Image (cartoon, rainbow, N blue to C red):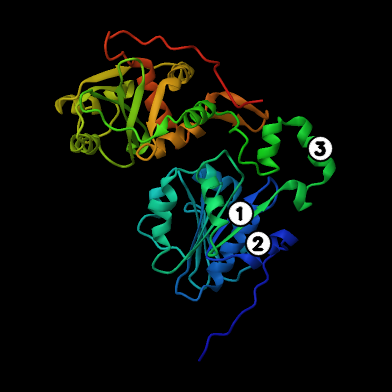
């Protein structure tokens, strides 16, 4: 006896352009949308439909935001609202998921814990605000979840400089297997001309072009290092940077919650240049793992610039601090004392004009420096004085520890760096 097909009417009436998106979707999709386009509502209803209609058993759909708390605040109410009319649906508040009567499931995730997606399968996934996600998330974590069931992916967001979202958008336009669309506020008709003119008066030109006209050329607002990294690209200082086996390799560390760790590998060149030849990052590993990884590399090491909390944080089992473990491995540590983050930022800004980065090995870290920015206060509509703590923070803090503590390769004296303006890319 066959299953009786049931008709369920979701309380969602897509706008004409949203309907165009639903009608055009392929297995791979990228949407560049202006603010208030309705991309979140469009995307969550797409996942609900897949979870209910996928012909494979127990469909699994995921909505991935830059942070899990962000997904909870922005998407969770939408997911509950649009799925509540489905007979037999159940909601799991703690796991941010809705279970469908056919065995399907829609779950919200965050890039602050991307490893939650490892080892599971997906039939459809949405990556929202992909520009703000760590570069590794798609290739290393999300893409493998789609393989065995031929799942689909929908990347959505607003531009945030020329990062991985920009690269994806450019490549998708040339690939017939992809659906790629851009929706500018001046063309969509969703926001009135009067409102757009009002917004343009209240925002800088760069803000308006990025948020409403989908410009990838606008600078990342509130970024500390974006212009300096762009200048390095124009100067040709982001390229292939070989290891010089005559010179020692210094390392710059930062450790965070959940055993997250970042390490830069830097060679000071006589004459003042700094060559950043490698970048290592990981999560959920003890300090011994990182020390083993360092030992595998063919480098002759100099000084390890590490944060003050490496002396105390419970990073490994037992009573030993990470610094104790590192010293027992023969590492030469220089512990950087606690300081105001703005001091570290200023030291880094002053240092960056003389830095060369290996483009391939440091890709993750370079992108983190581009996106490292001030926290935005939505209530006051202005930037705070404090940095935003996200996936970019550890790479930025690590290179900051080096900038604060570095001594030159010849004289042993602190380099005298030009003092640059403290901030960039803000109104």
Q: Which residue is mark 3?
A: 197
> CA separation, marks 3 and 2?
27 Å
Depth check: 33 or 306 in front? 33
- Which x, y percent locates residue 119? 35, 58
CA neighbours of label 1 inside 10 A, class few (<14), some (14 to 19), many (20+): many
Whether pointer 3 and pointer 1 mark residues with C-beta atoms closer than 8 Å, the reply is no
First in sequence: mark 3 vs mark 1: 1
CA neighbours of label 3 inside 10 A, class few (<14), some (14 to 19), many (20+): few
Q: Is residue 324 left or right of residue 195?
A: left
Q: Is residue 217 above or below residue 182?
A: above
- Which x, y percent locates residue 335? 29, 18
User: Could you tell me if residue 312 is visible in this image?
Assistant: no
- How many labels were placed on the picture? 3
Q: Is residue 340 left or right of residue 215?
A: left
Q: Which residue is mark 2?
A: 21
- Which x, y percent locates residue 183? 69, 51
Q: Is residue 352 left or right of residue 49?
A: left
Q: Which residue is mark 1?
A: 31
User: Could you tell me if residue 406 is visible in this image?
Assistant: yes
Depth check: 242 or 423 in front? 242
Whether pointer 2 and pointer 1 mark residues with C-beta atoms closer than 8 Å, the reply is yes
- Which x, y percent locates residue 88? 56, 70
- Which residue is pictured at 64% across the width and 58% down the height? 42
- Which residue is pictured at 65% across the width and 52% down the height? 182
- Residue furthest to the bottom in view is 1
> CA separation, marks 3 and 1?
24 Å
CA neighbours of label 2 inside 10 A, class few (<14), some (14 to 19), many (20+): many
First in sequence: mark 2 vs mark 1: 2
């Amino acid at each position: 006896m066959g299953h009786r097909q049931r008709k369920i009417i979701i309380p969602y009436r897509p706008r004409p352009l949203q309907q165009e998106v639903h009608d055009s979707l392929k297995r791979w999709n990228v949407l560049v949308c202006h603010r208030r386009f309705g991309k979140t509502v469009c995307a969550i209803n797409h996942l609900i439909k897949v979870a209910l209609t996928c012909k494979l058993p127990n469909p699994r759909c995921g909505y991935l935001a830059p942070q899990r708390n962000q997904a909870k605040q922005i998407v969770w109410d939408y997911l509950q609202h649009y799925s509540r009319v489905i007979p037999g649906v159940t909601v799991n508040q703690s796991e941010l998921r809705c279970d469908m009567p056919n065995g399907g499931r829609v779950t919200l995730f965050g890039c602050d814990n991307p490893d939650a997606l490892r080892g599971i399968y997906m039939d459809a996934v949405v990556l929202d605000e992909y520009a703000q996600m760590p570069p590794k998330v798609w290739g290393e974590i999300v893409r493998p979840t789609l393989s065995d069931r031929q799942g689909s992916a929908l990347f959505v967001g607003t531009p945030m400089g020329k990062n991985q979202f920009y690269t994806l958008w450019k490549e998708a336009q040339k690939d017939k297997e992809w659906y790629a669309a851009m929706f500018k506020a001046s063309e969509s008709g969703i926001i009135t001309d009067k409102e757009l003119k009002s917004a343009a008066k209240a925002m800088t030109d760069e803000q308006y072009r990025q948020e409403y006209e989908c410009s990838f050329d606008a600078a990342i607002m509130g970024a500390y290092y974006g212009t300096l990294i762009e200048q390095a690209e124009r100067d040709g200082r982001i390229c292939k940077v070989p290891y010089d086996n005559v010179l020692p390799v210094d390392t710059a560390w930062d450790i965070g919650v959940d055993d997250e760790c970042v390490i830069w590998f830097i060679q000071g060149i006589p004459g003042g240049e700094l060559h950043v030849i490698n970048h290592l990052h990981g999560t959920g590993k003890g300090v011994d793992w990182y020390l083993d990884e360092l030992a595998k590399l063919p480098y002759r090491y100099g000084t390890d610039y590490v944060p003050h909390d490496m002396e105390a944080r419970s990073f490994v089992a037992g009573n030993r601090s990470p610094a104790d473990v590192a010293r027992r491995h023969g590492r030469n540590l220089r512990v950087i004392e606690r300081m105001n983050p703005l001091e570290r930022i200023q030291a880094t800004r002053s240092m960056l004009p003389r830095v060369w980065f290996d483009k391939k090995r440091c890709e993750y870290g370079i992108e983190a420096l581009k996106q490292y920015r001030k926290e935005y206060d939505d209530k006051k509509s202005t930037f705070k004085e404090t940095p935003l703590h996200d996936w970019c923070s550890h790479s930025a803090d690590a290179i900051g520890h080096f900038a604060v503590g570095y001594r030159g390769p010849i004289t042993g004296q602190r380099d005298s760096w030009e003092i640059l303006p403290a901030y960039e890319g803000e109104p």
